[in-house]
Amino acid sequence: MKLRILLSLMLMLFSASVATAASLPDEDGYDLWLRYRPVEAAYARNLNVSAILGGDTPLQRSAESELQRGLKGLLGRDAARVKTVQAGALILGTPASSGLIKNLKLPLQGLGEEGFLIRSISLNSKPVTVIAANSDRGVLYGAFRYLSLIQTRQPLGHLNISDAPKTDLRLLNHWDNLDGSVERGYAGASIFDWWRLPDLKDPRLTDYARANASIGINGAVIDNVNASPLVLSDRYIAKAAAIADMLRPWGMKVYLSVNFASPKALGGLPTADPLDPQVIKWWQERTDAIYKAIPDFGGFLVKASSEGQPGPGDFGRTHAQGANMLARALKPHGGVVMWRAFVYASDNPEDRFKQAYDEFKPLDGQFDDNVIIQIKNGPIDFQPREPFSPLFGALTETNEMMEVEITKEYLGQATHLVYLAPMWREALQSDTYQQGPGTTVAKVLEGKVYGNRLTAMAGVSNIGADRDWTGTDFNQANWYAYGRLAWNPDADPKAIASDWTKMTFSDNPAFVTPVVNMMMGSHEAVVDYMTPLGLAHQMATGHHYGPGPWVCDLARPEWNPCYYAKADKGGIGFDRTATGSDALAQYAPEAAAKWSDPKTMDPRFLLWFHHVPWDFVSADEKPLWPDLIAHYDVGVDYVHDMQTTWADMKPYVDDRRFTAVSENLAIQAREAKWWRDAMIAYFQSKNGLSLPTGEAPPEHDLGYYESLQFPNAPGQGK
């Protein structure tokens, strides 16, 4: 009898799951985390939201329209715009725009220009919720936060939330070209239709701006850092102005990447020397023309003297002289210059790791106060794992910001499921020791260490014209997480993943818990099957798709993967101690000490800093060669575990998105094994060692892996 009851219950649960899955309409990912699907009736009954009382400024109208859209979708109710207080009303505004807000004398001081307060109060004996801020942009951010509370099923009866961003500028960097291609883009063409602008204003840009506003992103550099001089022509300024018009109602400013040689290439001058009076005048006139078309233009991003791009060094000038010339053209308008620290020396370097520090540290204090040095999270180039850049905290008199890569150029590109927030947090919470223990990178970026006038973060966008915006559904999580971490560099990646999962897929704990756990381990998995134990830059050259550790014949040493692994008969790894390049000396002594002894250091960074023999035994008491292979195996196995986890999620996801994720996980599983086998085959060709007992040999010989060519791999638009 008990068995029959148990079987009946199991059948009912199974039938309910099947019915749930079958009843879920297909989604294409376009709505991102702003899906606003109906909440459960039991939750909705406790929400008494009847009306919206707000201001009439452009940003407050955006906030009101988003609240109406969200509440209609989530609760199935219209929230009418009213002019008097009603029970259940949402009251929006600033002290300047609303007499009600002003008279409430809310504690808005300390929230800055973009912070907000959400509070449940009684007004005229009526229960209401106030969303207040010092600026309209703060009201907009507060409105999105309020909606996210409903999306994640938080109780709303007694709200008392105050929040403000810890950085001033929170930007996306689009590596989008004027021909519509996207460098390192894996989600289709550019969302900016440069050819048909300014006549055609794609409504999709409004949804792009809404998504960014929902996570606090307040600006976008809309063209590639490998910039075309044409972007400064009158024709393209008009196109940029049309984009700015669509982003402005959602609190976003437009910025442009500029080519340092534009005075020659576009202006017809004989030089681009930043100290030449004609060059200075040319930049001033072009900048004035931009601000005439875009009054709230944000400023310039510059990639100079790097990877063949022109720069002040071409004229015997310093980075500071080049940046300051542009900064002074922007200063009267309130604009900023973001000057990238990603530089290549003109000659072959001793160690690419050291170049940014060597070029920028001597210039500390020479940059104008509206210049920010934009520094990649690590010293090389967005690798699956890097130590933090030694420039963080070393520039004591210069504004500095972090640049991370949301698009996964080196982490499986569009198809691999890799949640990047744990990697970014690892860099943000690294202790620089530049002003003693606790001088984390995050505190430096937030201006808490040196009192920077400007604070900022930048993320290289993964957005394209694909219907789901980012190539695959889980890539959306990295866009979302970047915004959350740019707002608060101390935020918890697991909490961010949980919110994103609830808003994007389902709030059912049976779905959220395993999916979040899967996401949280995904970054370590890709490190394991690509570049374990501190290996770096082992990708095939050019397109960076797949493994290519054997490449060793390119013109510059640092273009070759073999340069970074330095695998030979005697060992593997890059010696950056005093017996090698001495890159460790660029860190504060306390930070360097953590990595100086290969026998006691964190083995995750071992081969970043040391060349060790194949039988070396690290701090975890594991011999290097079998440990290296074990990491590859663990990475491959984790991908299979993700496949199993996702298969179990079928009852909670619509068929279209479930199938799309499943197919990409199958690609990832195949490519993880490819990485494992190719890397082991290569290292065996160097060390001549047998595989540990029980380890499966590579599926093919090294020649097979070396023969693979992918000339049409995506993301190569320049």
Image: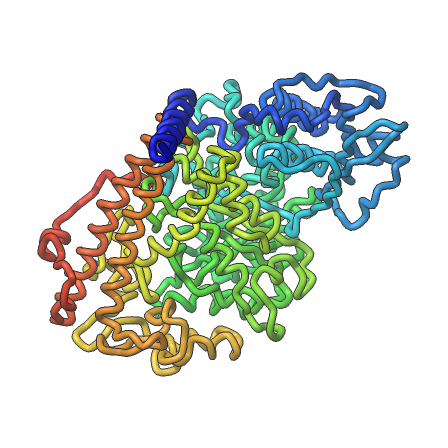
Identify which residue is drawn at 50% across, 24% down: 204
Is 330 displayed left or right of 681 in the figure? right
Q: In which quarter of the image is the N terminus?
A: top left
Identify which residue is drawn at 80% across, 44% down: 108
Residue 662 % position (x, y): 31, 36
Residue 175 % position (x, y): 43, 41
Residue 138 % position (x, y): 71, 38
Q: In which quarter of the image is the C terminus?
A: top left
Q: In which quarter of the image is residue 552?
A: bottom left
> Which coloring applies here?
rainbow
Residue 467 % position (x, y): 41, 26
Q: In which quarter of the image is residue 438?
A: bottom right
Residue placed most toward the observer, 520 or 201 = 520
Residue placed most toward the observer, 616 or 644 = 644
Is 709 displayed left or right of 322 in the figure? left
Q: Which residue lies furthest to the front in this view?
A: 1
From this viewpoint, is residue 489 visible?
A: yes
Q: Vertical placement of 25 versus 682: above or below? A: above
